[in-house]
Image (cartoon, grey):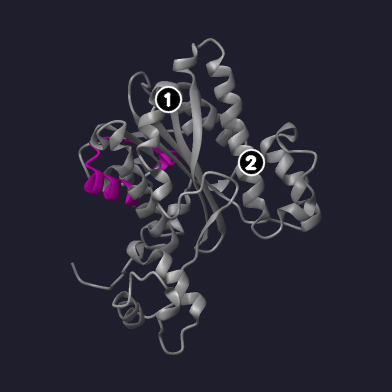
């Protein structure tokens, strides 16, 4: 089975790179709950292992697991695996996730799909939320680009996720532009909440698990993408979660409102010139000849996470 890594270099997608750094900054806040280096990371490394590079070097993760579905190219993944602490599991995530150890392991799971939300993805979400230890984090990324003719999008979505998961109030027009991402976020959050309702059924109140959304990213390095996720914690951990002060991060979104990662097209010289004027409390004081105020504002929101790509011989 082939993978999209053969067509897309995930290491140099600017919005994706910005997203990784924002995730990294979010994860640092978990140290109030558990020393962040004690967290286990589960993701889909692909041949580039970009998130594994960043999280190991920036957060000192030592327990890392990459699930790779392309079993025909296992040698390539093994060759590109950057660190000894990464364990690669070959197979579909639906098959691998249920076999992993979950008890008493603080875990960050990034289910970073390049395809559509479907019933297999929802099954993975259910597996994680049914088993992950309190204080853990789940992040889900899916393609949110409106596909096909507008008149067929709603039927296509129902076939992908199951008709029962699509609210009767959703209309074809609701799936236009970023509307698809908004609907997918609702379906994902409902799946998490329903899973936790089942899980909490036999638990005493202090042990019951709550899900708090932290992230709701929209971005497009081509196709529109949605990344949504948050923390699952017990009532006994509520004070620690509050003391993480996630809400102080400017990109954190706990409700329906999205954070759009908008990458302006600027030259390296323009980027450096803007950097000399940032940070600033009043963005209207920042200027750059020939560049719109909107592009300047968009850059000011992400300049700390902005990737710098260069061609070099190594």
- Element on which disc 1 rests: loop
In which quadrant is the C terminus drawn?
A: bottom left
Q: Residue at x 50, y 82 (%)?
A: 292
Write the start and end of the magenta stretch as one range.
Answer: 49-72
Question: Is 34 placed left or right of 155 in the picture?
Answer: left
**Residue highlighted by disc 1:** 132
Q: Magenta span has 59?
A: yes
Q: Can residue 202 be seen in the rendering of this structure?
A: yes
Position of 121 compared to 170: left or right?
left
Report if the CB atoms under discs 2 and 1 are less than 8 Å apart: no
For label 2, count other residues whose C-alpha is less than 10 Å away and answer few (under 14), some (14-19) or many (20+). Answer: some
Where residue 26 sits: x, y (%)? Answer: 37, 46
Measured as percent of width and height from the top left, residue 196 is found at: 55, 23
In the rendered image, residue 64, in percent from the top left (x then y), is placed at 29, 36
Q: From the viewer's perspective, is residue 96 above or below residue 308?
A: above
Q: Quadrant of residue 83?
A: top left
Give the mark count: 2
Residue topped by disc 2 = 186
């Amino acid at each position: 089975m082939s993978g999209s890594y053969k067509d897309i270099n995930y290491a140099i997608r600017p919005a994706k790179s910005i997203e990784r750094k924002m995730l990294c900054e979010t994860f640092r806040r978990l140290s109030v709950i558990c020393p962040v280096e004690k967290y286990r990371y589960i993701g889909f490394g692909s041949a580039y292992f970009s998130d594994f590079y960043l999280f190991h070097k920036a957060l000192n993760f030592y327990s890392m697991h990459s699930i790779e579905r392309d079993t025909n190219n296992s040698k390539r993944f093994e060759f590109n695996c950057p660190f000894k602490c990464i364990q690669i599991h070959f197979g579909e995530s639906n098959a691998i996730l249920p076999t992993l150890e979950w008890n008493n392991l603080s875990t960050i799971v990034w289910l970073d799909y390049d395809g559509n939300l479907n019933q297999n993805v929802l099954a993975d979400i259910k597996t994680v939320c049914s088993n992950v230890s309190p204080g853990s984090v789940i992040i889900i990324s899916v393609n949110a680009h409106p596909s096909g003719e507008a008149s067929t999008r709603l039927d296509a979505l129902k076939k992908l996720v199951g008709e029962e998961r699509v609210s009767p109030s959703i209309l074809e027009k609701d799936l236009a532009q970023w509307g698809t991402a908004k609907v997918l976020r609702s379906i994902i959050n409902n799946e998490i909440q329903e899973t936790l309702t089942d899980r909490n059924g036999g638990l005493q109140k202090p042990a019951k698990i709550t899900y708090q959304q932290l992230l709701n990213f929209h971005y497009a390095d081509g196709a529109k993408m949605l990344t949504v996720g948050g923390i699952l914690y017990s009532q006994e951990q509520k004070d620690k979660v509050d003391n993480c002060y996630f809400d102080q991060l400017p990109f954190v979104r706990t409700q329906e409102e999205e954070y759009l990662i908008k990458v302006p097209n600027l030259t390296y010289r323009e980027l450096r010139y803007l950097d000399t004027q940032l940070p600033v409390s009043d963005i209207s004081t920042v200027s750059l000849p020939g560049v719109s105020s909107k592009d300047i504002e968009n850059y000011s929101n992400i300049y700390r996470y902005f990737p710098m790509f260069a061609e070099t011989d190594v």
